[in-house]
Image (cartoon, coloured by chain):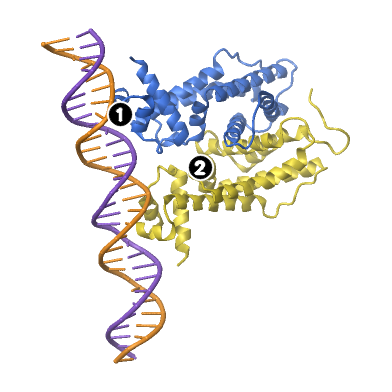
Chain colours: A blue, B yellow, C purple, D orange
Amino acid sequence: MDDKRRIILDAALEAFAERGYHGTAVPEVAEAAGVGTGTLYRYFENKEALVNEVYRDAKQRLRAALLVGVPDPDLYRLDAAEMWFAELWRRLGTFAKTEPDAFRFLEMQDHVAYLDNKSREVELSVLAPLWLAGKRLRDRSDGPSVDVIIALLWGAFVGLIKAQRLGYLRLDDKQLEQAGAACWRLVAPDLPRTRGPRSKKS
Amino acid sequence: MDDKRRIILDAALEAFAERGYHGTAVPEVAEAAGVGTGTLYRYFENKEALVNEVYRDAKQRLRAALLVGVPDPDLYRLDAAEMWFAELWRRLGTFAKTEPDAFRFLEMQDHVAYLDNKSREVELSVLAPLWLAGKRLRDRSDGPSVDVIIALLWGAFVGLIKAQRLGYLRLDDKQLEQAGAACWRLVAPDLPRTRGPRSKKS
DNA sequence: ATTTACGGAACGAACGTTCATTCCGTAATT
DNA sequence: AATTACGGAATGAACGTTCGTTCCGTAAAT
Protein backbone atom coordinates (compact mmCIF):
# COMPACT_ATOMS: atom_id res chain seq x y z
CA MET A 1 0.00 0.00 0.00
CA ASP A 2 1.75 3.09 -1.22
CA ASP A 3 -1.46 5.07 -1.35
CA LYS A 4 -0.99 5.43 2.39
CA ARG A 5 1.16 8.36 1.53
CA ARG A 6 -1.71 9.83 -0.46
CA ILE A 7 -4.13 9.27 2.41
CA ILE A 8 -1.83 11.01 4.85
CA LEU A 9 -1.35 13.93 2.46
CA ASP A 10 -5.09 14.35 2.11
CA ALA A 11 -5.74 14.17 5.82
CA ALA A 12 -2.93 16.63 6.47
CA LEU A 13 -4.29 19.05 3.89
CA GLU A 14 -7.68 19.01 5.51
CA ALA A 15 -6.27 19.57 8.97
CA PHE A 16 -3.84 22.30 7.90
CA ALA A 17 -6.57 24.04 5.92
CA GLU A 18 -8.84 24.00 8.94
CA ARG A 19 -6.48 24.82 11.78
CA GLY A 20 -3.24 25.96 10.21
CA TYR A 21 0.22 24.51 10.52
CA HIS A 22 0.91 25.36 14.14
CA GLY A 23 -2.63 24.59 15.16
CA THR A 24 -2.47 21.04 13.89
CA ALA A 25 -0.90 18.21 15.90
CA VAL A 26 0.87 15.43 14.06
CA PRO A 27 -0.94 12.61 15.91
CA GLU A 28 -4.18 14.34 14.90
CA VAL A 29 -3.22 14.00 11.26
CA ALA A 30 -2.22 10.39 11.75
CA GLU A 31 -5.54 9.57 13.37
CA ALA A 32 -7.52 11.34 10.66
CA ALA A 33 -5.59 9.33 8.09
CA GLY A 34 -6.27 6.15 10.02
CA VAL A 35 -2.63 5.28 10.62
CA GLY A 36 -0.39 5.18 13.64
CA THR A 37 1.74 8.15 14.48
CA GLY A 38 4.90 6.18 13.86
CA THR A 39 3.68 5.18 10.43
CA LEU A 40 3.33 8.78 9.42
CA TYR A 41 6.98 9.26 10.22
CA ARG A 42 7.86 6.41 7.90
CA TYR A 43 6.51 8.48 5.02
CA PHE A 44 7.53 11.97 6.08
CA GLU A 45 10.71 12.96 7.78
CA ASN A 46 9.04 15.44 10.10
CA LYS A 47 6.17 17.87 10.34
CA GLU A 48 7.88 20.51 8.27
CA ALA A 49 8.62 18.08 5.46
CA LEU A 50 4.99 17.02 5.60
CA VAL A 51 3.63 20.51 5.28
CA ASN A 52 6.00 21.23 2.41
CA GLU A 53 4.82 18.18 0.53
CA VAL A 54 1.22 19.08 1.20
CA TYR A 55 1.91 22.54 -0.11
CA ARG A 56 3.64 21.38 -3.27
CA ASP A 57 0.98 18.79 -3.89
CA ALA A 58 -1.83 21.31 -3.59
CA LYS A 59 -0.01 23.94 -5.60
CA GLN A 60 0.72 21.55 -8.42
CA ARG A 61 -2.91 20.54 -8.57
CA LEU A 62 -3.80 24.21 -8.76
CA ARG A 63 -1.34 24.67 -11.58
CA ALA A 64 -2.77 21.74 -13.46
CA ALA A 65 -6.33 22.95 -12.93
CA LEU A 66 -5.44 26.39 -14.19
CA LEU A 67 -2.96 25.90 -16.95
CA VAL A 68 -3.18 22.46 -18.53
CA GLY A 69 -4.53 22.82 -22.03
CA VAL A 70 -4.93 26.58 -21.90
CA PRO A 71 -3.49 28.20 -24.99
CA ASP A 72 -1.61 31.46 -24.83
CA PRO A 73 -3.95 34.37 -25.39
CA ASP A 74 -3.95 36.05 -28.74
CA LEU A 75 -1.86 39.12 -28.40
CA TYR A 76 -3.81 41.32 -30.75
CA ARG A 77 -7.43 40.47 -30.13
CA LEU A 78 -9.12 41.98 -27.17
CA ASP A 79 -12.09 39.63 -27.25
CA ALA A 80 -9.76 36.65 -27.42
CA ALA A 81 -7.92 37.93 -24.41
CA GLU A 82 -11.19 38.37 -22.61
CA MET A 83 -12.18 34.81 -23.35
CA TRP A 84 -8.80 33.64 -22.17
CA PHE A 85 -9.28 35.47 -18.91
CA ALA A 86 -12.83 34.17 -18.54
CA GLU A 87 -11.52 30.66 -18.98
CA LEU A 88 -8.93 31.13 -16.27
CA TRP A 89 -11.51 32.62 -13.96
CA ARG A 90 -13.85 29.71 -14.56
CA ARG A 91 -11.07 27.26 -13.86
CA LEU A 92 -10.20 29.06 -10.66
CA GLY A 93 -13.81 28.80 -9.62
CA THR A 94 -13.90 25.11 -10.37
CA PHE A 95 -10.75 24.52 -8.39
CA ALA A 96 -12.00 26.48 -5.40
CA LYS A 97 -15.24 24.55 -5.49
CA THR A 98 -13.92 21.03 -6.01
CA GLU A 99 -10.86 21.36 -3.80
CA PRO A 100 -11.85 23.87 -1.15
CA ASP A 101 -9.27 22.62 1.32
CA ALA A 102 -6.45 22.95 -1.17
CA PHE A 103 -7.54 26.45 -2.12
CA ARG A 104 -8.00 27.53 1.45
CA PHE A 105 -4.70 26.10 2.55
CA LEU A 106 -2.80 27.68 -0.31
CA GLU A 107 -4.25 31.12 0.17
CA MET A 108 -5.27 31.60 3.75
CA GLN A 109 -2.04 30.74 5.49
CA ASP A 110 1.19 32.58 5.71
CA HIS A 111 3.53 29.91 4.53
CA VAL A 112 6.76 31.74 4.11
CA ALA A 113 8.14 30.73 7.48
CA TYR A 114 8.33 27.02 6.86
CA LEU A 115 8.46 26.63 3.08
CA ASP A 116 11.69 25.27 1.64
CA ASN A 117 13.29 26.22 -1.66
CA LYS A 118 11.71 23.39 -3.56
CA SER A 119 8.27 24.59 -2.52
CA ARG A 120 9.12 28.11 -3.55
CA GLU A 121 10.07 26.85 -6.98
CA VAL A 122 6.69 25.23 -7.36
CA GLU A 123 5.09 28.48 -6.28
CA LEU A 124 6.86 30.30 -9.05
CA SER A 125 6.00 27.64 -11.61
CA VAL A 126 2.36 28.63 -11.23
CA LEU A 127 2.95 32.34 -11.25
CA ALA A 128 5.46 32.54 -14.09
CA PRO A 129 3.18 31.46 -16.95
CA LEU A 130 0.48 33.87 -15.85
CA TRP A 131 2.97 36.63 -15.49
CA LEU A 132 4.36 36.00 -18.95
CA ALA A 133 0.94 35.90 -20.53
CA GLY A 134 0.00 39.10 -18.75
CA LYS A 135 3.20 40.66 -19.86
CA ARG A 136 2.45 39.84 -23.47
CA LEU A 137 -1.02 41.30 -23.14
CA ARG A 138 -0.29 44.44 -21.25
CA ASP A 139 3.29 45.32 -21.72
CA ARG A 140 2.78 48.46 -23.73
CA SER A 141 -0.24 49.78 -21.95
CA ASP A 142 -0.53 52.54 -19.42
CA GLY A 143 -1.82 51.99 -15.96
CA PRO A 144 -0.63 49.54 -13.36
CA SER A 145 2.14 47.12 -14.18
CA VAL A 146 1.51 43.46 -14.83
CA ASP A 147 2.63 42.52 -11.33
CA VAL A 148 0.10 44.86 -9.81
CA ILE A 149 -2.71 43.63 -12.03
CA ILE A 150 -1.98 40.00 -11.21
CA ALA A 151 -1.86 40.74 -7.50
CA LEU A 152 -5.17 42.60 -7.70
CA LEU A 153 -6.94 39.89 -9.68
CA TRP A 154 -5.59 37.08 -7.61
CA GLY A 155 -6.45 38.90 -4.42
CA ALA A 156 -9.93 39.71 -5.70
CA PHE A 157 -10.65 36.07 -6.37
CA VAL A 158 -9.25 35.00 -3.03
CA GLY A 159 -11.33 37.67 -1.33
CA LEU A 160 -14.43 36.45 -3.07
CA ILE A 161 -13.95 32.85 -1.98
CA LYS A 162 -13.00 33.89 1.51
CA ALA A 163 -16.10 36.03 1.85
CA GLN A 164 -18.19 33.09 0.74
CA ARG A 165 -16.52 30.77 3.24
CA LEU A 166 -17.08 33.24 6.06
CA GLY A 167 -20.74 33.53 5.15
CA TYR A 168 -20.68 37.13 3.94
CA LEU A 169 -22.18 36.10 0.63
CA ARG A 170 -23.33 33.16 -1.38
CA LEU A 171 -22.02 32.46 -4.83
CA ASP A 172 -23.71 30.70 -7.69
CA ASP A 173 -22.18 30.18 -11.09
CA LYS A 174 -23.79 33.26 -12.52
CA GLN A 175 -22.50 35.53 -9.82
CA LEU A 176 -19.07 34.05 -10.15
CA GLU A 177 -19.11 34.77 -13.85
CA GLN A 178 -20.32 38.32 -13.28
CA ALA A 179 -17.54 38.82 -10.79
CA GLY A 180 -15.06 37.61 -13.38
CA ALA A 181 -16.49 40.02 -15.94
CA ALA A 182 -16.17 42.85 -13.45
CA CYS A 183 -12.57 41.90 -12.81
CA TRP A 184 -11.86 41.88 -16.51
CA ARG A 185 -12.70 45.57 -16.55
CA LEU A 186 -9.83 45.97 -14.19
CA VAL A 187 -7.53 44.82 -16.98
CA ALA A 188 -9.15 45.70 -20.22
CA PRO A 189 -9.30 49.47 -20.56
CA ASP A 190 -5.54 49.73 -20.67
CA LEU A 191 -5.02 47.06 -23.24
CA PRO A 192 -3.91 48.02 -26.73
CA ARG A 193 -6.98 47.65 -28.90
CA THR A 194 -7.44 45.28 -31.79
CA ARG A 195 -5.85 46.66 -34.87
CA GLY A 196 -3.12 44.30 -35.83
CA PRO A 197 0.53 44.20 -34.85
CA ARG A 198 2.14 47.25 -33.40
CA SER A 199 5.55 48.66 -33.66
CA LYS A 200 7.96 47.79 -30.91
CA LYS A 201 7.99 49.66 -27.66
CA SER A 202 9.80 52.94 -27.96
CA MET B 1 1.41 52.47 34.76
CA ASP B 2 -1.57 51.51 32.69
CA ASP B 3 0.33 51.83 29.46
CA LYS B 4 1.77 48.44 30.28
CA ARG B 5 -1.37 47.04 28.82
CA ARG B 6 -0.71 49.04 25.68
CA ILE B 7 2.86 47.79 25.50
CA ILE B 8 1.74 44.19 25.81
CA LEU B 9 -0.92 44.67 23.13
CA ASP B 10 1.63 46.12 20.74
CA ALA B 11 4.15 43.37 21.36
CA ALA B 12 1.45 40.75 20.95
CA LEU B 13 0.26 42.28 17.69
CA GLU B 14 3.75 42.19 16.29
CA ALA B 15 4.29 38.58 17.32
CA PHE B 16 0.88 37.40 16.12
CA ALA B 17 1.31 39.22 12.81
CA GLU B 18 4.66 37.58 12.30
CA ARG B 19 4.06 34.04 13.47
CA GLY B 20 0.32 33.65 13.91
CA TYR B 21 -1.67 32.81 17.01
CA HIS B 22 -0.59 29.21 17.43
CA GLY B 23 2.95 30.00 16.38
CA THR B 24 3.42 32.54 19.16
CA ALA B 25 4.27 31.56 22.73
CA VAL B 26 2.94 33.67 25.56
CA PRO B 27 6.32 34.06 27.31
CA GLU B 28 7.66 35.26 23.96
CA VAL B 29 5.11 38.07 23.97
CA ALA B 30 5.93 38.91 27.57
CA GLU B 31 9.61 39.12 26.84
CA ALA B 32 9.05 41.25 23.75
CA ALA B 33 6.95 43.58 25.89
CA GLY B 34 9.64 43.68 28.54
CA VAL B 35 7.45 42.28 31.31
CA GLY B 36 7.38 39.07 33.26
CA THR B 37 5.13 36.30 32.08
CA GLY B 38 3.04 36.53 35.20
CA THR B 39 2.54 40.23 34.66
CA LEU B 40 0.94 39.57 31.31
CA TYR B 41 -1.62 37.43 33.05
CA ARG B 42 -2.45 40.32 35.35
CA TYR B 43 -3.71 42.22 32.31
CA PHE B 44 -5.19 39.44 30.22
CA GLU B 45 -7.09 36.45 31.44
CA ASN B 46 -5.46 34.04 29.02
CA LYS B 47 -3.96 33.77 25.57
CA GLU B 48 -7.31 33.71 23.83
CA ALA B 49 -8.51 36.83 25.61
CA LEU B 50 -5.25 38.49 24.61
CA VAL B 51 -5.62 37.68 20.94
CA ASN B 52 -9.22 38.87 20.98
CA GLU B 53 -8.21 42.20 22.47
CA VAL B 54 -5.39 42.52 19.98
CA TYR B 55 -7.85 41.83 17.20
CA ARG B 56 -10.43 44.33 18.37
CA ASP B 57 -7.79 46.94 18.98
CA ALA B 58 -6.36 46.56 15.49
CA LYS B 59 -9.75 46.42 13.84
CA GLN B 60 -10.93 49.54 15.57
CA ARG B 61 -7.85 51.38 14.47
CA LEU B 62 -8.58 50.24 10.94
CA ARG B 63 -12.13 51.47 11.23
CA ALA B 64 -10.97 54.82 12.49
CA ALA B 65 -8.37 55.12 9.74
CA LEU B 66 -10.96 54.32 7.10
CA LEU B 67 -14.14 55.94 8.22
CA VAL B 68 -13.56 58.83 10.58
CA GLY B 69 -14.51 62.01 8.80
CA VAL B 70 -15.48 60.39 5.53
CA PRO B 71 -18.79 61.72 4.25
CA ASP B 72 -21.30 59.47 2.57
CA PRO B 73 -20.84 59.47 -1.18
CA ASP B 74 -23.20 61.43 -3.32
CA LEU B 75 -25.67 58.97 -4.71
CA TYR B 76 -26.19 60.60 -8.09
CA ARG B 77 -22.78 61.84 -9.08
CA LEU B 78 -20.42 59.36 -10.53
CA ASP B 79 -17.36 61.54 -10.14
CA ALA B 80 -18.21 62.20 -6.51
CA ALA B 81 -18.50 58.47 -5.94
CA GLU B 82 -15.16 57.97 -7.61
CA MET B 83 -13.53 60.52 -5.36
CA TRP B 84 -15.12 58.87 -2.36
CA PHE B 85 -13.66 55.56 -3.42
CA ALA B 86 -10.27 57.09 -4.12
CA GLU B 87 -10.27 58.54 -0.64
CA LEU B 88 -11.03 55.17 0.91
CA TRP B 89 -8.33 53.53 -1.17
CA ARG B 90 -5.81 56.15 -0.13
CA ARG B 91 -6.72 55.67 3.51
CA LEU B 92 -6.35 51.93 3.19
CA GLY B 93 -2.92 52.46 1.72
CA THR B 94 -1.94 54.76 4.56
CA PHE B 95 -3.13 52.28 7.13
CA ALA B 96 -1.28 49.39 5.50
CA LYS B 97 1.85 51.48 5.37
CA THR B 98 1.80 52.99 8.84
CA GLU B 99 0.48 49.94 10.67
CA PRO B 100 1.76 47.00 8.65
CA ASP B 101 1.50 44.60 11.57
CA ALA B 102 -2.11 45.50 12.23
CA PHE B 103 -3.01 45.12 8.58
CA ARG B 104 -1.16 41.86 8.23
CA PHE B 105 -2.62 40.42 11.37
CA LEU B 106 -6.15 41.40 10.44
CA GLU B 107 -6.00 40.00 6.94
CA MET B 108 -3.50 37.20 6.81
CA GLN B 109 -4.78 35.01 9.60
CA ASP B 110 -7.81 32.86 9.82
CA HIS B 111 -9.31 34.19 12.99
CA VAL B 112 -12.66 32.56 13.11
CA ALA B 113 -11.58 29.73 15.39
CA TYR B 114 -10.74 31.83 18.40
CA LEU B 115 -12.69 35.07 17.98
CA ASP B 116 -15.45 35.70 20.48
CA ASN B 117 -18.76 37.43 19.83
CA LYS B 118 -17.53 40.82 20.91
CA SER B 119 -14.76 40.64 18.34
CA ARG B 120 -17.19 39.63 15.64
CA GLU B 121 -19.30 42.67 16.43
CA VAL B 122 -16.31 44.90 15.92
CA GLU B 123 -15.66 43.14 12.64
CA LEU B 124 -19.13 43.99 11.47
CA SER B 125 -18.88 47.58 12.66
CA VAL B 126 -16.20 48.11 10.01
CA LEU B 127 -17.98 46.31 7.25
CA ALA B 128 -21.48 47.64 7.77
CA PRO B 129 -20.86 51.30 6.86
CA LEU B 130 -19.03 50.29 3.69
CA TRP B 131 -21.74 47.89 2.79
CA LEU B 132 -24.43 50.51 3.29
CA ALA B 133 -22.58 53.07 1.23
CA GLY B 134 -22.04 50.54 -1.51
CA LYS B 135 -25.68 49.63 -1.37
CA ARG B 136 -26.69 53.21 -1.89
CA LEU B 137 -24.35 53.53 -4.82
CA ARG B 138 -25.04 50.33 -6.62
CA ASP B 139 -28.35 49.02 -5.57
CA ARG B 140 -30.13 49.45 -8.86
CA SER B 141 -27.34 48.47 -11.15
CA ASP B 142 -26.76 45.26 -13.00
CA GLY B 143 -23.72 43.15 -12.50
CA PRO B 144 -22.41 41.68 -9.28
CA SER B 145 -24.12 42.46 -6.00
CA VAL B 146 -22.69 44.84 -3.45
CA ASP B 147 -21.39 41.99 -1.34
CA VAL B 148 -19.47 40.59 -4.26
CA ILE B 149 -18.03 43.95 -5.21
CA ILE B 150 -16.88 44.63 -1.67
CA ALA B 151 -15.30 41.21 -1.42
CA LEU B 152 -13.49 41.72 -4.71
CA LEU B 153 -12.21 45.18 -3.84
CA TRP B 154 -11.15 44.24 -0.36
CA GLY B 155 -9.46 41.12 -1.63
CA ALA B 156 -7.72 43.04 -4.37
CA PHE B 157 -6.25 45.46 -1.91
CA VAL B 158 -5.18 42.69 0.43
CA GLY B 159 -3.63 40.84 -2.49
CA LEU B 160 -1.71 43.93 -3.48
CA ILE B 161 -0.24 44.47 -0.03
CA LYS B 162 0.49 40.78 0.38
CA ALA B 163 2.32 40.67 -2.94
CA GLN B 164 4.38 43.62 -1.85
CA ARG B 165 5.22 42.02 1.48
CA LEU B 166 6.27 38.80 -0.24
CA GLY B 167 8.52 40.71 -2.59
CA TYR B 168 6.57 40.07 -5.79
CA LEU B 169 6.35 43.79 -6.45
CA ARG B 170 7.22 47.15 -5.07
CA LEU B 171 4.66 49.85 -4.56
CA ASP B 172 5.10 53.56 -4.62
CA ASP B 173 2.31 56.07 -4.13
CA LYS B 174 1.73 56.45 -7.82
CA GLN B 175 1.33 52.75 -8.44
CA LEU B 176 -0.99 52.46 -5.49
CA GLU B 177 -3.14 55.21 -6.92
CA GLN B 178 -3.16 53.58 -10.35
CA ALA B 179 -4.19 50.34 -8.75
CA GLY B 180 -7.03 52.12 -7.03
CA ALA B 181 -8.12 53.67 -10.30
CA ALA B 182 -8.07 50.26 -11.95
CA CYS B 183 -10.18 48.86 -9.13
CA TRP B 184 -12.66 51.65 -9.54
CA ARG B 185 -13.31 50.37 -13.04
CA LEU B 186 -14.44 47.22 -11.36
CA VAL B 187 -17.28 49.19 -9.80
CA ALA B 188 -18.05 52.03 -12.09
CA PRO B 189 -19.46 50.67 -15.35
CA ASP B 190 -22.48 49.28 -13.57
CA LEU B 191 -23.31 52.39 -11.66
CA PRO B 192 -26.41 54.29 -12.61
CA ARG B 193 -25.19 57.35 -14.45
CA THR B 194 -25.99 60.91 -13.62
CA ARG B 195 -28.69 60.95 -16.20
CA GLY B 196 -30.79 58.34 -17.89
CA PRO B 197 -30.81 54.58 -17.41
CA ARG B 198 -27.85 52.50 -16.42
CA SER B 199 -25.10 51.71 -18.83
CA LYS B 200 -25.05 48.16 -19.95
CA LYS B 201 -22.33 45.98 -21.26
CA SER B 202 -23.11 43.85 -24.23
C1' DA C 1 12.21 63.11 60.19
C1' DT C 2 12.66 58.50 60.46
C1' DT C 3 11.02 54.06 60.75
C1' DT C 4 7.66 50.51 60.19
C1' DA C 5 3.64 48.41 58.04
C1' DC C 6 1.05 47.69 54.28
C1' DG C 7 -0.70 46.26 49.55
C1' DG C 8 -0.73 45.74 44.93
C1' DA C 9 2.35 45.18 40.89
C1' DA C 10 5.83 42.40 39.03
C1' DC C 11 8.54 38.49 38.43
C1' DG C 12 10.10 33.94 36.82
C1' DA C 13 10.61 29.21 38.51
C1' DA C 14 7.58 25.44 38.62
C1' DC C 15 3.39 22.80 37.31
C1' DG C 16 0.61 19.93 34.53
C1' DT C 17 -0.39 19.36 29.75
C1' DT C 18 0.40 18.80 24.96
C1' DC C 19 3.41 18.56 21.34
C1' DA C 20 6.81 16.37 17.88
C1' DT C 21 9.40 12.55 17.59
C1' DT C 22 11.32 7.93 18.79
C1' DC C 23 11.23 3.24 20.09
C1' DC C 24 10.02 -1.32 20.14
C1' DG C 25 6.94 -5.35 20.15
C1' DT C 26 3.90 -7.34 16.76
C1' DA C 27 1.95 -8.28 12.21
C1' DA C 28 2.52 -8.67 7.43
C1' DT C 29 5.30 -9.69 3.56
C1' DT C 30 8.99 -11.81 1.12
C1' DA D 1 13.43 -17.27 8.41
C1' DA D 2 14.35 -12.82 7.48
C1' DT D 3 12.87 -8.42 6.44
C1' DT D 4 9.81 -4.74 6.22
C1' DA D 5 5.65 -2.18 7.75
C1' DC D 6 2.93 -0.80 11.32
C1' DG D 7 0.87 1.09 15.64
C1' DG D 8 0.75 3.39 19.71
C1' DA D 9 3.05 3.83 24.18
C1' DA D 10 7.12 6.27 25.66
C1' DT D 11 10.08 10.41 25.77
C1' DG D 12 11.73 14.87 26.32
C1' DA D 13 11.01 19.54 24.94
C1' DA D 14 7.95 23.34 24.83
C1' DC D 15 3.68 25.13 25.88
C1' DG D 16 0.00 27.88 28.72
C1' DT D 17 -0.77 28.93 33.18
C1' DT D 18 -0.11 29.37 38.27
C1' DC D 19 1.95 30.59 42.45
C1' DG D 20 5.17 31.90 46.09
C1' DT D 21 8.03 35.49 46.49
C1' DT D 22 10.13 40.10 45.84
C1' DC D 23 9.87 44.80 45.00
C1' DC D 24 8.43 49.48 45.75
C1' DG D 25 5.56 53.55 46.55
C1' DT D 26 2.66 55.24 50.11
C1' DA D 27 0.66 55.68 54.64
C1' DA D 28 0.85 55.08 59.52
C1' DA D 29 3.44 55.14 63.58
C1' DT D 30 7.13 56.61 66.12
A176 relative to D2 in the view: left or right = right
Q: Which mark is residue B111?
A: 2
Displayed quadrant of residue A136: top right
Task: Say left or right for B74 vs A43.
Answer: right
Which residue does the image show at 79% across and 42% down from the upper left? B79
Q: Chain of mark 2?
A: B
Asked which quadrant contains residue A189, the reply is top right
Of B118 and D12, the residue lying toward us: B118
Which quadrant holds residue B191? top right
According to the picture, the residue beneath numbered tag 1 turns out to be A37
**Disc 1 on helix, strand or loop?**
helix
- Badges 2 and 1: C-beta atoms under 8 Å apart? no
Q: Nearer the viewer, mark 2 or mark 1?
A: 1
Q: Quadrant of the C terminus of chain A?
A: top right
Q: Label 1 crowding class (10 Å Cα cut-off): few <14, some 14-19, many 20+? A: some
Give the tally of numbered discs: 2
Q: Is residue B182 above or below residue B121?
A: above
Q: Which amino acid type is marked by label 1?
A: Thr
* Real-space Cα separation, disc 2 to disc 1, in angstroms: 28 Å
User: Which amino acid type is shown beneath numbered disc 2?
Assistant: His
- Work out whether residue A118 can be spotted: no
The answer to whether tags 2 and 1 share a subunit is no
